[in-house]
Image (spheres, rainbow, N blue to C red):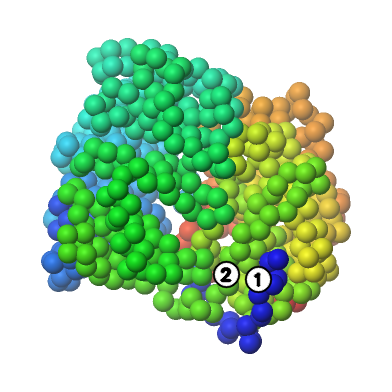
Amino acid sequence: MPHASPPAAQPPRRYPLKDFFRNPDRGFFRLADDGKTLGFMQPAALDEHPARMNIYVQPLQDGQPAGEPRRLTGETARDISNFFWKGNDIVLYQKDFGGDENFHVLAVNARTGTVHDLTPYPGVRAGIEDDLPDDPGHVLISHNQRDPQVFDVYRVNVHTGAAVLVAQNPGNVVGWQTDHAGKVRAALTSDGLETTLLYRDDEATPFRPLITTDYRTTVSPAFFTFDDRKFYALSNRGRDKLALVVIDPARPDDEELVYATGEVDLDAAGYSRKRRVLTLAAYQTDRPRRHYFDAQTEALYQQLESLLPGYDVAIQGWNRDEDTYIVAAYNDRTPGARYLFQAGTGTLHKLADINPSIPEADMSPVRPVRYASRDGLDIHGYLTLPAGRAPRGLPCIVNPHGGPWARDGWGYNPEVQFLANRGFCVLQMNFRGSTGYGRRFWEAGFGQWGLAMQDDITDGVRWLIDQGIADPARIGIYGGSYGGYATLAGIAFTPDLYAAAVDYVGVSNLFTFMNTIPPYWKPLLAKMHDMVGHPERDHDRLAATSPALHVDRIRTPLLIAQGAQDPRVNKAESDQVVQALRQRGVEVEYLVKDNEGHGFHNDENKFEFYAAMEAFFVEHLKP
């Protein structure tokens, strides 16, 4: 049972909040194509602004950094969230403004420091479709400048920003797929309820429909076969779980099965560009798993696991020759370290510890658990018990994930470890509607916001109490996005269950939520109506399950945090709950950040939110 392990001699010391949530001193390592330059990010405080994650480069010699790092970017408003190399000299990164998710794509020359905004259009969302590794001067970028609801694809010069249209969206394409030569060869269209995979033999030929399914069936192209004539896809046609298949456009209904687990959906597949072979399939049961197709890849992972015992390893990047790798070593109690590995010599050089101020030995194991829902479904989840405390009668925080069409997995989670360090047990659960467990489990959540999906969360609370782990009088609930909705639903519809609640950018009103989605979600609105509910057809159900319309039932102490620029969950979602509660004289703490969107990213805002959350849970749950 989850509480069979003996408690440690005494609880570990309380580590500073900022140590859990601050940006790493150095992280996000990436290799230039030739393997001679390392890119990474670290905080830089410029012109008296707060420190933001910016991109640095450093030469590599004999498998380790040499010389001084050089800062390439000078962002002061927000952290850069990600970047990657284009060839040996250009670094590409994306930035948005205040969290509005209207990302621009920028290119910076690693030798000269010259920065080009490749998509300098206000209010437009852009993303990289293909980095065109064989074309040193160009990338494929999609954006919605022509029509806010859809994305066209352009071949963009990374030195000048000059753009040429290569695929215009007819109005219903929701995803594009390139072949190994960087040609746009496939597209997914949706009318909301039906999905069609379009295909063409080359860019001069018009697209033709290949496969049409309802949206509940997935046929998602992953990458082309190495002769560019067929393609690998993740498909659940005629089965419950996503499997890796090969589809021949000449016979699109005859899938060739490559690999399936039968237990869970496959998440992804990988290949070697250099050797032109399939390498692995990735999936998650209780923990991340890999299936190897290729002996060389399997030997590489086995070598890394033997060099880094006690850690899960992930390969995060490599050079074009595929002989130098960025390797992450982590587990459930630490984000771990990053290494540079040279396959030829077998040498491993540590680049950085991601969070050395939090000792792994003082953190809490994350244990896979399962319990039965009231109608007999298996609900999988993760239980984190505070180190050094007997697992009886604990204050507990139930932490439903966002999405909701996503899942929680095993690994290091700073929020969970922070709460455990403060003496709380934490339960995360993959309620019905979560992805990864097959189509039937996902579909079981349709039309069940605030109903059976919420019951699965409630049943997890009951399980914690029945196990003797939780003190029934000291249970809190905290979640973001859909998890924020589940938090509000929990205190509105099961008001006796929770002693405190924290809603982070959560949906409160299912009518206003669907009226305020970003324009590029509009093609998917029919699907949202089918999966969540239609404002007219399902009016009574949506009204019954919108917490904002039932604030008269809420009496649990509540803290709400919201980004003013959030394009997904509009600020009005939080405003209406706060206003209604305050009119009733119910105190609710409300934290709004004008320079954030769907979740807080800047360090100072994260610190303020987590400090408020800690004080709130300590006051009401008394760990």
Q: Nearer the viewer, residue 104 or 449?
A: 449
Q: Residue at x 65, y 71 (%)?
A: 385
Report whether residue 502 is seen: no
Q: Is residue 364 left or right of residue 470?
A: left
Mark 1 closeness class: few <14, some 14–19, many ≥20 residues within 10 Å: many
Give percent across and percent down for residue 478.
67, 59
Q: Residue at x 55, y 35 (%)?
A: 241
Q: Residue at x 22, y 46 (%)?
A: 86
Q: Nearer the viewer, residue 275 or 427?
A: 275
**Residue corresponding to mark 2:** 365
189 versus 449 height, above or below: above
CB-based contact (under 8 Å), mark 1 and mark 2: yes
Q: Is residue 315 left or right of residue 360?
A: left
Mark 2 closeness class: few <14, some 14–19, many ≥20 residues within 10 Å: many
Q: Nearer the viewer, residue 325 or 145?
A: 325
Element marked by disc 2: loop
Amino acid of disc 2: Pro
Element marked by disc 1: loop
3D distance between C-alphas at marks 1 and 2? 7 Å
Q: Earlier in the sequence, mark 1 or mark 2?
A: 2
